[in-house]
Amino acid sequence: MFKELVTDVFFDLDHTLWDFEKNSALTFEKILSRNHIDIPLSKFLEIYVPTNLAFWKLYREEKITKDALRYQRLKSVFDKLELEITDTMIHRLSDEYIQYLSSYNHLFPNTIEILEYLKPKYRLHIITNGFQEIQDKKLRNSGIDSYFVHVINSEMAGVKKPNPLIFQLALDRAGVAAENSMMIGDSLEADILGAKALNFNVLHFNSHQEPKHEHCPMLDHLCEIKSFL
């Protein structure tokens, strides 16, 4: 069905192609150690991972700024862990996190394989809510930047997924209709429902093991894309 309609495929980046949780964990392992913060990494991540997702939701909804996101997610974690960390240290950790995050470049299994499979058949693009300076480094350092024609980010669009304006900007940049486009991402709210509202074809990469739904097909592995495209 999709093979006959789709000419352009839009991917989310974090949690879809670029293994955010693994790379983030390696980054925190490095910066917590170098700043002599004595807490087991697993204990820190147990609190950080859901906290970060919650603050990113607020950021998507325009309820906090980028600077507030970077500070508050760490401040909230240390408060929950009952660790006394100065604001100076929180800002240092925040800066170092951004500095080192893109130096780790683990991709989800089969990322290169599926991009190699799709590249001769479709034009490939990225739509991401991530910060431009970091996302560009992730794409370049992980060696996948050459697969994509357009990279649309929320800072460029002035809005974040699921706002329809970022999807419309992506369509305009690519010069393609939504009906001929496929959006593949991990977030039901931001990627799937956001793109579907503009009549994109959609596939949900279920990297968070979310419950099954009826909005679109769900994929457990990226190689399953071959069944649809």
Image (spheres, helix red, strand yellow):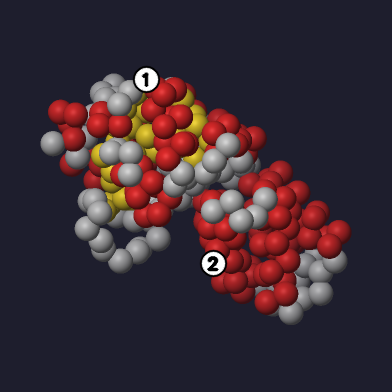
Where does label 1 land, which residue?
A: 175
Asked which secondary structure carries label 2, the reply is helix
Identity, as a three-letter code, of the amino acid under mark 2: Pro
Say which of marks 1 and 2 sits in front: 1
* In this view, 138 is above or below 146: below
Q: Quadrant of residue 43?
A: bottom right
SS for callout 1: loop
Q: Quadrant of residue 58?
A: bottom right
At label 1, which amino acid type do we have?
Answer: Gly
Query: What is the spatial separation of the Cα atoms under label 1 and label 2, in whole angstroms?
Result: 37 Å
Check disc 2 and report the residue beneath it: 50
Mark before the other along the chain sequence, 1 or 2? 2
Left or right: residue 108 versus residue 214 is right
Q: Residue at x 41, y 32 (%)?
A: 168
Q: Position of residue 84 (x, y in %)?
A: 81, 74
Q: Could you classify mark 1 by the number of other residues whose Cα lies within 10 Å: few (under 14), some (14-19), or many (20 or more)?
A: few
Pointers 1 and 2 in contact (C-beta within 8 Å) = no
* Relative to 143, 40 lies left or right: right
Position in image of residue 88 (x %, y %)? 86, 59
| Residue 68 in sight here | yes
In the image, residue 82 sits, relative to residue 24, either above or below, namely: below
